[in-house]
Amino acid sequence: MYMQAQSLSRGTGRINADCLISLMLYGVFMNDKTDIFDEMMGDKGSPREPYHKYQQWIEAQDAARLRKKSADAEAIFRRTGITFNVYGRENVAESLIPFDIIPRILSAREWARLSRGIEQRVRAINAFLYDIYHRQEILKAGRIPQEMIAKNVAFLPQMIGVSPPGNIYTHIVGTDIVRTDEDTFYVLEDNARTPSGVSYMLENRETMLQMFPELFSKVRVRTVNDYPKHLRRSLGASAPDACKGRPVVAVLTPGIHNSAYYEHSFLADQMGAELVEGHDLRVVDGRIAMRTTCGYSPIDVLYRRVDDDYLDPLNFDPNSMLGVPGIMDVYRAGGITIANAPGTGIADDKAIYSYMPEIVEFYTGEKAVLQNVPTWRCSESSSLSYVLDNLSDLVVKEVHGSGGYGMLVGPAASKKELAMFSEKLKANPANYIAQPTLSLSTVPILTKSGLAPRHVDLRPFVLVSPEKIDISPGGLTRVALKKGSLVVNSSQGGGTKDTWVLEE
């Protein structure tokens, strides 16, 4: 644990006794953790280059001021209503997203490499989706087993032969990235269905600008505040041929009880788009139209935050009250763009994820810039045997899981939990993949005792249109607030940080 700094001489001056931050002491602490890379201190006990200007600022800060700013930030989040629901917990009110005021900082060079790898991956995913719903060349070439697609519940036969406008399937992508050392980044998973969290990225930055305006005049950070403008433009550029004039964009939400409803309403408001629910929409003259005070008006692009199963009761789950009857027929006829396209879930299936290096190479002709985490497919008998024999050392995930649910972190599990999960694996091995427990990088957070390292991941957000690919500089850093925890999801006790990408 970080110790309260007393009085410490430096070449640039002297830190007073009430100063909370001593990066020298933090560096000494991190040097004891030789197997974990700390993004602020690296492995040399002094701040890494991206943190130099921030170091100068933070070491001059008073403990009481930082604690007050942290409390102010929490008040802003509470007043703004930045909350989420946790499914499966009865009598629990909406929870506040924990926010830490110590930013995570990436250099321009680091970001350039990440951006190159993310763009390569997103292009390959879109090409893969087009292929598997058309000629299926990758299956014919034997690069992916046919049963991985044919037996996958995320594959939608209703999408076979359908070509979305511009052949764009994944208009909004969230790519989860982890780091293990100075130069090694891994893609942990792809989120190609309805990635969430971008509203927290925007609110984190806005809060930091309010709390520390003087800091942003000292450290030149690339902006993320133009994301809603880019989102609106990207969605508009993906409008169908049926669109006449300026594209009409709407956000489809399941409603106020959805865990991400705050984000749905936030993005609709920021884009100047309508926020609609299924009962607000109907098919009119071969188009999807929304109810207005002047009658029903056609929509060109629907940014849907409703899962495939509930999108159209005539084509999917007949009991769904969240979707729009007949929307798939309008979509197939080219009357509306649905973002993201139905059937994109096959691309972020965790078993398909294990083939991403092959997918990238097949469609781009290049080796993947960003590595995958080594993955065992439990559907394969040899892999299952290895996973069962080494369960206590592995992380096991459901192939269609999200939010940290349904997973096992072997090193943190009890003998009883390991035994129970072993039986789950034997009963339904195809439902799981396993990965090694990586030594994820850490970034300091502000605790009551001072600075302390916590594990993080990063979710950059990508906008894809027929015209271009936009990647917001930075994205959402999710942080495991519990000491030693590797689970960063807010539903599992994690929090968020502002992510800075330096201008130069």
Image: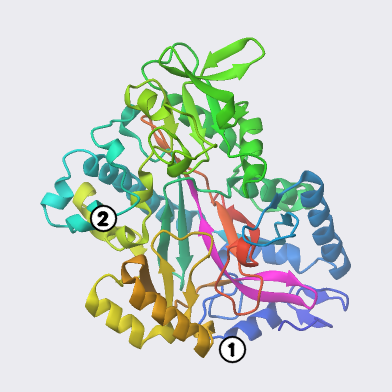
Judging by the rendered image, the residue that carries numbered circle 2 is 151
Q: Is residue 81 magenta?
A: no
Who's the residue at 56% across and 66% down the image? 49
Per the image, label 2 sits on a secondary structure element best described as loop
Which label is found at residue 58?
Answer: none
| Between 359 and 51, the one nearer to me in the picture | 359
Who's the residue at 58% across and 37% down the image? 253
Q: How many marks?
A: 2
Q: Is residue 441 left or right of residue 341?
A: right
Q: Is residue 13 above or below residue 174?
A: below
Residue 472 rendering spot, x and y as whole percentages: 52, 45
Q: Which stretch did the figure color magenta?
A: 443-461
Q: Is residue 467 above or below residue 131?
A: above
| Between 389 and 28, the one nearer to me in the picture | 389
Residue 434 rendering spot, x and y as whole percentages: 37, 73
| Identity, as a three-letter code, of the amino acid under mark 2 | Lys
Per the image, label 1 sits on a secondary structure element best described as loop
Q: Is residue 46 above or below residue 215?
A: below
Task: Tell which circle, 1 or 2, labels the residue nearer the N-terminal end.
Answer: 1
Residue 273 rendering spot, x and y as whole percentages: 60, 26
The answer to which quarter of the image holds residue 55 is: bottom right
Quadrant in which the N terminus appears: bottom right
Q: Main secondary structure of the magenta part?
A: strand
Q: Is residue 375 visible?
A: no
| Between 471 and 195, the one nearer to me in the picture | 195
Which label is found at residue 32?
Answer: 1
